Amino acid sequence: MSSIAQDRATGSAVDFLSKERTIAGPGFNRWLVPPAALAIHLCIGMAYGFSVFWLPLSKAVGISAPQACPNGTGFLGELVATGCDWRVSTLGWMYTLFFVFLGSSAAVFGGWLERAGPRKAGLVSMLCWCGGMLVSALGIHLHQFWLMLLGSGVIGGIGLGLGYISPVSTLIKWFPDRRGMATGMAIMGFGGGAMIGSPLAQLLMTRFATPTSVGVAETFVAMALLYALFMTAGALAYRVPAAGWKPAGWTPPAPAANAMIASRHVHLDNAHRTPQFWLVWAVLCLNVTAGIGVIGMASPMLQEVFGGRLIGVDAVIGALDATQAAQIAAIAAGFTGLLSLFNIGGRFFWASMSDRLGRKATYAIFFVLGTALYASAPSAGHAGSIALFTGAFCLILSMYGGGFATVPAYLADLFGTQFVGAIHGRLLTAWSVAGIFGPVIVNYLREFQIGHGVEKAQAYDTTMLILAALLVAGFICNLLIRPVAPKWQMSDEELGSARKLAHETVAAGTASAAVPAAASPVALVLIAWLAVGIPLAWGVAQTVAKAAILFQ
């Protein structure tokens, strides 16, 4: 191939990935965008399900039983040790890195995403997330934990951040009339990713396991290839509306109709200078801190609070025989599955409700109801009311998921839609902080109280009251949020310059040249939704089957 031909081929590839080539023309069906976002979020959402690999990896050397490292081997020693197995607590650091790098990469690359567009960001997310899994597979094969941390933790974490925020701005611009519902659909996928990925990983590990391998490395490779296919399809399906586009027949509400919805946009460089940004940051951080610690301790919490009462035996968890303990563990797994269903369902339900109630009112419900539920949970546990205890935490987890799904629309209301994806990326540093403090509060307080003679059944009482106090603080922060002052809002000239830098065209301009004007076929919309709906339905069915044991 000549140099001229090579240059043309390279230029064509670059043009295809450019934001200008993703601008939709007349007739494009906006309902094709949510399944594209779901295709990516359902894949990266497996980050929530990585704990399914911990026990098999903890015996990757010993195979039938863990091969402990020599006494005195610390964390740094485990990074490079090849002759002994990793501890579950060590493997858990990958989970921590996921959310640290998710938040930090979303903050760092959010501005680039607004300029590059969702297609390019989605493809980079795919390369990082799936490439990270392949690096981790190599780390498992060589038994080098530092490679796993680099692969899935760091590189994969960057992919998480880019994949998580890539559809946010696009969906909000496509659905100005239903901002909460639109972001709820996508972020629902992130909560549901583990419902698909965890049972799939179990099936693959069983298939690939041999007398000399626990099958995790092979599972990583298979899932990376499958995820690459889905994420690429999702990224290539992204389209953005032309600047100023609005649904047919929809009229933007007058500014006086809802003072909390801005009629102008705030620049990314100014958003973090406003008190509103930091108040919403605190609102998200406090809501997530209260919920994320419970997610990590849901199974042992139920077992330790109720013990044998879960199976009609009046005995604490430590007094049960092996058969009874196995029955309790199965019920606790069902409890965890039930929480997952409410987590994913709450993302869509609460975000959609916020379109009617308003974002501020929705968060007020989260904090008032959540405070009451956390404060009453210890009483339900001591009274032996499994139904009340379970119901309380199902509602709590629905509001935990709802908080994630509602916050992008909250930001769009306050700061406008021009930079909402990048502003959301910076806000996700609150998730990184919560991902550290939430588990610390729940885990270390439990250990501290048990170490000081408190019975396991009562070790969570103080923790629940502290989490309730966090939600009270969140309620106050939410109460203080007011509309952004006009001095921070962009003029028409500044907005025009920002759109030019973001490679945007106006609705009446050249948008129709990017995509044919013919309307998107209804069959294409149906196929797109089936492509993500069938795996999601399978994951939900698997989770429901696991949760059904609670009602037997």
Image (cartoon, rainbow, N blue to C red):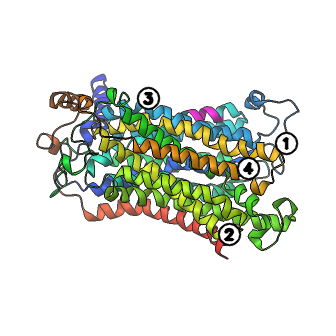
Label 2 or label 3, whichever comes before in sequence order? 3
Report the predominant secondary structure element of the magenta stretch.
helix
In depth, the one of 104 and 442 nearer the eye is 442
Residue 99 position within the rendered picture, expressed as x and y whole percent measured from the top left: 55, 39
**Which SS class for mark 4?**
helix
Q: Amino acid at mark 1?
A: Gln
Element under disc 3: helix
Q: Residue at x 33, y 53 (%)?
A: 358
Give the label, 2 or 3, closer to the camera.
2
On the rendered structure, is 281 left or right of 114? right
Name, please, the residue furthest toward the left.
508
- Which tag is nearer the camera, tag 2 or tag 1? 2
Q: Amino acid at mark 4?
A: Pro
Circle 1 residues within 10 Å: few <14, some 14–19, many ≥20: some
In percent of width and height, residue 181 lies at 35, 56
Residue 108's tag is 3
Residue 67 - label: 1
Specify which label sits upstream in the sequence, 2 or 4.
4
Q: Measured from the top left, where is residue 221 in percent x and y?
A: 59, 45
Which is in the foreground here, disc 3 or disc 1?
3
Which residue appears at 85% of the width and 64% of the height? Answer: 320
Q: Which image quarter is the C terminus in?
A: bottom right
Is residue 222 in view?
A: no
Of the numbered discs 4 and 1, the one sitting upstream in the chain is: 4
- Which region is colored magenta? 148-154
Q: Which mark is residue 385?
A: 2
- Distance from disc 2 to disc 1, alpha carbons, whole Å, reads 41 Å
Q: Residue at 40% across / 63% down in the picture?
A: 530
Distance from label 3 to label 1 (Cα)?
Answer: 40 Å
Could you say whether the residue bearing mark 1 is in a helix, strand or loop? loop
